[in-house]
Each structure stands twice: as structure tokens, then as C-alpha cells.
Image (cartoon, coloured by chain):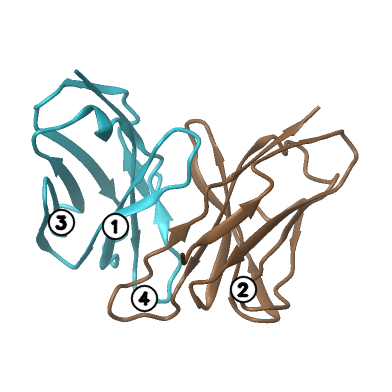
């Protein structure tokens, strides 16, 4: 089935450690995104990539890093520089650009990161 | 003022009720409007997509866009307990621009 796969679903990290969240899509979408979701704050864009080997910072990129070496994959590293990393992280993708459906975004199931 | 605003709720309705969920926005250039449904601890799923003004219907769901008022709505008819979720509105200026999400409205449909 086509979709977006995020792993792990739940992750615990000690303070000072980096952690990498995996995101793979088989939808043949060009664009991929990482969002962070906190209670009461909605979705905030961390990084996005519209093409392989290129990515841009979103609204809250500090303390995060990404790579886009393959069209299907867009891993997110939460570094020790991220001051408040405990959150629900969502990977997403869209067909870019698609004049027929705007910029509708499809999401993975999310990864819960807890810093202990 | 936030670019997209939603009443966070929680909104609680009895089964079978008509539900109205709303978003207001400040950027008059938005042309693409979307509604997502998010169940607890899951990723959001696309419910409805509309372009520019007007209505769009899909089963029990109707999306309305009023660009003159900068206001969009999602109506759910004959609401079911399975509709209990958080509903996020989202919008963008064009097909390659950043999508802006509202904070979401939490809905509970009571049997």
C-alpha cells in the first residue's frame, strides 16, 4: 500500500543525546516535510524539501537537521541543541507542484519523542 | 494576530447532531483550503479540499469557503461517535506555497 512510514513510533532520549527519526514514502511525492505538534499549538513546520538534495528551514528549525539524499527518504535529527524536544513529530509529503489539488499534504502516523 | 485561527474547543455534541467547525484567516491571498481530521495519537488525514470560494460536499461532510469574510467552515451531518477527533483547517496561497495550519478544534460526539 502507498503511504508514509515513520519510525520509531515511540522514542525516549536522554538529555544531551542526538536522535534520528526515520521517514519513508512510496507515494512518489516530490516534497517532504517535518512538523512538530505540541498541545494547543497546532502544527509547526521544522524543515521541508521540494527536491532531492535540497531543503529549507521552516519556522522552528533551530536544534534540528535533515537530509534528502533520496526522493523516498527524509530523516530528521533532533540534536542536543533543541531546548525542548519532547513532542509529537509528523512527517508528511505532497506532490509538488500540483495545480489540480493545490498543496494537499499527506501525513505519516507520527513519532513520539520523550526526553528523560 | 495569527494567520489562521480556530476555536480549540472542546466541542461536545450528541450523536446525530449537525456540527459546524470554523476557521478565520487574515491573508486574503489564500486560495486553497483543506480540512484534516486527526484521531488521538495519529497523523492527520485529509478530509476535504476546496479551491477558492464555494461549497463542496462529500457524504456527510460539507466544506464552505467565504473569501469575502475570510472564513471557512466544515459541516458534519448526522454526527457519529467515530467523528470524535481534532479537526484542523489548512490553507495556502497557491499550489507551491507553504501550507498554514490552524491549531485544531477538538470534537466529541456523545452516543
Q: Which residue is mark 4?
A: B95
For image coordinates 31% across by 38% down, the residue present is B6
Q: In the picture shown, does residue B80 fall above or below A7?
A: above
Residue at mark 4 to residue at mark 1: CA–CA distance = 12 Å
Please state which of the two labelled residues, at mark 1 or mark 3, is closer to the viewer. Answer: 1
Near mark 2 (Cα within 10 A), the count class, few <14, some 14-19 or many ≥20, is: some
Residue at mark 2 to residue at mark 1: CA–CA distance = 24 Å
Along the polypeptide, which appears first: circle 1 or circle 3? 1
Whether residue A59 appears in this view of the structure is no
Co-location on one chain, circles 4 and 2: no
Q: Secondary structure at mark 3?
A: strand
For image coordinates 32% across by 59% down, the residue present is B27
Q: Secondary structure at mark 2?
A: loop
Q: Colour of chain A?
A: brown
Q: Secondary structure at mark 1?
A: strand
Instruction: Indicate left or right for A36 with A54 as reference.
Output: left
Along the polypeptide, which appears first: circle 3 or circle 4? 3
Co-location on one chain, circles 3 and 2: no
Asked if labels 2 and 3 touch by Cβ distance under 8 angstroms, the answer is no
Instruction: Indicate left or right for B6 with B97 as reference.
Output: left
Near mark 4 (Cα within 10 A), the count class, few <14, some 14-19 or many ≥20, is: some
Q: Which mark is residue A72?
A: 2
Near mark 1 (Cα within 10 A), the count class, few <14, some 14-19 or many ≥20, is: many
Q: Quadrant of residue B106?
A: top left
Q: Secondary structure at mark 4?
A: loop
Residue A55 placed where, x, y %? 66, 73
Residue at mark 4 to residue at mark 2: CA–CA distance = 21 Å
Residue B73 placed where, x, y %? 17, 46
Q: Which residue is mark 3?
A: B65
Amino acid at each position: 500500500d502507498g503511504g508514509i512510514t515513520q519510525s520509531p513510533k515511540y522514542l525516549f532520549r536522554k538529555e544531551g543525546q542526538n536522535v534520528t527519526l526515520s521517514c519513508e514514502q512510496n507515494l512518489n511525492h516530490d516534497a517532504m516535510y517535518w512538523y512538530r505538534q505540541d498541545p494547543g499549538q497546532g502544527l509547526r513546520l521544522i524543515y521541508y524539501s521540494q527536491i532531492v538534495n535540497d531543503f529549507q528551514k521552516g519556522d522552528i528549525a533551530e536544534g534540528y537537521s535533515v537530509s534528502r539524499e533520496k526522493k523516498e527518504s527524509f530523516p530528521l535529527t533532533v540534536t542536543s541543541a533543541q531546548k525542548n524536544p519532547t513532542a509529537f513529530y509528523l512527517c508528511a509529503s505532497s506532490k509538488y507542484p500540483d495545480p489540480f489539488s493545490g498543496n494537499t499534504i499527506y501525513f505519516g502516523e507520527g513519532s513520539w519523542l520523550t526526553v528523560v | 494576530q495569527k494567520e489562521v485561527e480556530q476555536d480549540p474547543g472542546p466541542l461536545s455534541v450528541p450523536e446525530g447532531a449537525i456540527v459546524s467547525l470554523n476557521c478565520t484567516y487574515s491573508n486574503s491571498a489564500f486560495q486553497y483550503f483543506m480540512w484534516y481530521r486527526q484521531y488521538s495519537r495519529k497523523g492527520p488525514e485529509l478530509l476535504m479540499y476546496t479551491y477558492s470560494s464555494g461549497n463542496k460536499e462529500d457524504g456527510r461532510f460539507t466544506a464552505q469557503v467565504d473569501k469575502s469574510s475570510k472564513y471557512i467552515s466544515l459541516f458534519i451531518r448526522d454526527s457519529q461517535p467515530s467523528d470524535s477527533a481534532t479537526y484542523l483547517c489548512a490553507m495556502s496561497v497557491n499550489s507551491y506555497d507553504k501550507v498554514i495550519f490552524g491549531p485544531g478544534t477538538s470534537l466529541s460526539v456523545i452516543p
